[in-house]
């Protein structure tokens, strides 16, 4: 067996061979488009990996590793936002030079991003059904659907630390998404006033929520800047649909308690 090298460890021969341009010429900017989106998928894979680890650490009550993992995820989110700056160096005319070659391909088909939404608490059965039977995306989302979310692990973390989390929250239907709970909000208000360590964990959840909202907003503006009001690839309504995803916090209780301090 040959000795391990930088190239063989990272499988660079394979990695650098999968940027397959479809445009004639080919168009110069298609390379940028492919690489940025492939890198996005790699970062999504890493965030999914980290969120699973974060959930386990919450259940175990391992606050130092909870904080450390949050820091890593939040740092990656900043990189995701910064990558949009790179995409925005591509003008509308440059994108249109190869856009038709994307055919029905669309970012809406990123099953890893959908899996990440499931992890954070936005589980929807119709999302699973959108992917064909037997596809990797369908298998991944089926396996994730119905499992406790990061928010559920947080509620267990609070209960394990002596907080009187309402039973209806601890035993909630995880497929319904996170709904505000006045009973839980009372617990959180007490926590914020009296428990600096747990309060710090709560604030990292707020940072995570805000980070994803920032990425969604920047994504919308990038799409508007590039294609305006045109329909998106894959038959989506493009920026108009993306705008409907804005300003919907994943962890609403942590936002609703703000006026009460």
Image (cartoon, rainbow, N blue to C red):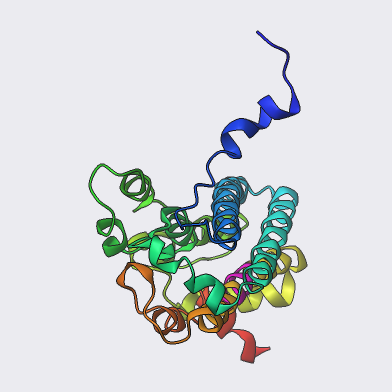
On-image quarter of the N terminus: top right
Residue 186 visible somewhere in the drawing: no
Name the residue: 61% across, 31% down: 13
Stretch in magenta: 208-214
**Which of the pair 12/147 is nearer the observer?**
12
Q: Position of residue 232 (x, y in %)?
A: 39, 74
Residue furthest to the top in view is 1
Q: Position of residue 238 (x, y in %)?
A: 41, 78
Count of numbered marks: 0
On-image quarter of the C terminus: bottom right
Residue 212 on the magenta segment:
yes
**Which of the pair 206/108 is nearer the observer?**
108
Name the residue: 61% across, 40% down: 16
Name the residue: 25% across, 42% down: 134
Residue 129 visible somewhere in the drawing: yes
Q: Is residue 113 above or below residue 90?
A: above
Name the residue: 70% across, 62% down: 79
Q: Is residue 115 left or right of residue 163?
A: left
Q: Position of residue 177 (x, y in %)?
A: 39, 68
Q: Is residue 174 above or below residue 19?
A: below
Residue furthest to the bottom in view is 259
Q: Is residue 11 left or right of residue 146?
A: right
Residue 54 on the magenta segment:
no
**Which of the pair 189/47 is nearer the observer?**
47
Q: Quadrant of residue 15?
A: top right
């Amino acid at each position: 067996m040959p000795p391990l090298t930088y190239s063989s460890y990272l499988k660079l021969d394979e990695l650098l061979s999968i940027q397959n341009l479809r445009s004639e010429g080919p168009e110069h900017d298609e390379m940028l488009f492919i690489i940025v989106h492939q890198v996005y998928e790699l970062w999504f894979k890493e965030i999914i990996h980290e969120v699973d680890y974060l959930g386990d650490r919450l259940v175990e009550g391992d606050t130092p590793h909870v904080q450390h993992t949050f820091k890593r995820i939040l740092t990656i989110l900043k990189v995701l936002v910064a990558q949009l700056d790179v995409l925005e160096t591509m003008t509308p005319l440059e994108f249109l030079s190869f856009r038709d070659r994307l055919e029905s391909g669309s970012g809406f088909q990123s099953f890893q991003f959908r899996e990440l939404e499931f992890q954070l608490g936005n589980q929807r059965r119709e999302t699973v059904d959108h992917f064909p039977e037997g596809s990797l995306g369908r298998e991944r989302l089926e396996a994730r659907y119905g499992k406790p979310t990061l928010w559920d692990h947080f509620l267990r973390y609070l209960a394990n630390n002596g907080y009187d989390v309402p039973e209806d929250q601890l035993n909630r239907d995880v497929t319904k998404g996170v709904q505000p709970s006045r009973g839980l909000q009372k617990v959180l208000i007490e926590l914020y006033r009296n428990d600096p360590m747990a309060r710090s964990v709560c604030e990292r959840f707020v940072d995570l929520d805000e980070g994803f909202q920032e990425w969604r907003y920047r994504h919308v503006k990038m799409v508007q800047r590039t294609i305006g009001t045109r329909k998106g690839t894959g038959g989506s309504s493009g920026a108009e649909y993306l705008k409907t995803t804005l300003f919907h916090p994943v962890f609403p209780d942590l936002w609703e308690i703000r006026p009460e301090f």
